[in-house]
Image (tube, rainbow, N blue to C red):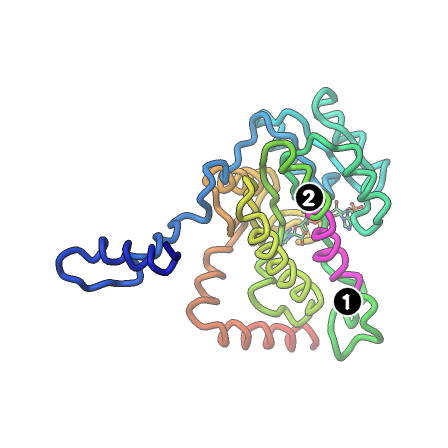
Amino acid sequence: MKRRDILRGLAFAAAGASGSVTRAQVVPAAPTTASRWPLKSMRVDGATVLVTGSNQGIGLGFVKALLARGAKRVYATARREESLPDVVALDPGRVRALVLDVNEPEQRQRAAAQATDVTWLINNAGVPGSRTRSEDRILAAASLDDGHWVMQTNCWSPAELCRLFAPIIVKNGGGAITNILSVGAWYCVPQNTTYSMSKAAAAMMTAGVRAELDREPVLVSGVYTAGVATNMSGGQGMDPVAHAHLVLDAAGRGETDILAGTGVERLRDAVRADPKAVERERIERMHAADK
Ligand SMILES: NC(=O)c1ccc[n+]([C@@H]2O[C@H](COP(=O)([O-])OP(=O)(O)OC[C@H]3O[C@@H](n4cnc5c(N)ncnc54)[C@H](OP(=O)(O)O)[C@@H]3O)[C@@H](O)[C@H]2O)c1
């Protein structure tokens, strides 16, 4: 019997006596959750996690929260070796230090060759942009070199790490990839256009990786973060460990779009309600900052 005929037969059976057929009756219902795989929620206990940029800020918060929740092993990675001993000292039995500048292809390859037991990749390392304000913009910049570097660090390098670690995670029986994005992915912060560009691109990269891993037992999530007290935010906001616990809780619930940080839900609601009003407000902020 041809496939078309099978579908017709199913439709007829589903239509019952009335004979009316709707598409929903012949096509299997779409899963209501993000995934049809039972493993697409992720628990920390027993997991082996690699965190990029784990020497400070949000990354260090993840290491602490992962250890507190019973991770089997944490690969604490950072681009400066001298920044790692304090992180290893948190739990020398479970924390392994790896030097990893995410922009260095050889270091990425070496990390993947060494950390073959990883079940969870947390792409956290990121840069807010140049220290020269004009370079964070498009027209005011002397060149777009800085913009390319921001895009490399915040989008392409995490993508390269997804490419390296997705097969490892699958081979290890499944797990998770968590990409730390930003609310800056939802709208342009014109003082930092290159940052918003990179995080918006990273959000799409995350969605693409999630699609490609749809039939694998890997939970792929993007984290829309804001207002966490780190060097990047000028020390204002939520404790990085508290932020990490929110993200880990959300992964445990199988969330693919995770909101974590100070005022994130409020910003999401404002963007949903009136995106142009948010854009206008950000433009006015840029003018005020330029005075
Ligand atoms: N804090 C917030 O409120 C906030 C809001 C939205 C999004 N985020 C995102 O959260 C992530 C972490 O930021 P944070 O707030 O924790 O800032 P942070 O304290 O400045 O930490 C940034 C981390 O990224 C590392 N890093 C930068 N470039 C790297 C590279 N090429 N290779 C390896 N590591 C690199 C830094 O290493 P060094 O110590 O060597 O510089 C540092 O460990 C970023 O992706 C950021 O965009 C933060």
Residue placed furthest toward the top: 93
Relative placement, left or right, of 89 versus 260 is right
Residue placed furthest toward the left: 17
Above or below, 280 relative to 204: below
Closer to the chain start, of discs 2 and 1, is: 2
Q: Pointer 2: what residue?
A: 57
Q: Verify whether residue 151 appears in magenta.
A: yes
Res 16 → quadrant: bottom left
Residue located at (58% from left, 72% from top): 282
Q: Verify whether residue 232 appears in magenta.
A: no
Residue located at (68% from left, 47% from top): 162
Badge 2 local density, few (<14 within 10 Å), some, or many (20+)?
many
Residue located at (39% from left, 49% from top): 31
Foreground pick, 207 / 200: 207
Amino acid type at circle 1 is Gly
Above or below, 44 relative to 104: above
Relative placement, left or right, of 57 versus 35 is right
Badge 1 local density, few (<14 within 10 Å), some, or many (20+)?
many
Q: Pointer 1: what residue?
A: 147
Above or below, 185 relative to 178: below
Horizontal and vertical percent for residue 150? 76, 61
Amino acid type at circle 2 is Gly
Foreground pick, 108 / 52: 108
Horizontal and vertical percent for residue 32? 38, 50
Relative placement, left or right, of 245 versus 27 is right
Circle 2 — which element? helix
Q: Is mark 2 within 8 Å of ligand 1?
A: yes
Residue contact between numbered discs 2 and 1, judged by CB atoms under 8 Å: no
Task: Name the main secondary structure of what is drawn in magenta.
Answer: helix
Magenta segment, which residues? 147-162
Horizontal and vertical percent for residue 82? 86, 36
Instruction: Specify the quadrant that holds the C terminus.
Output: bottom right
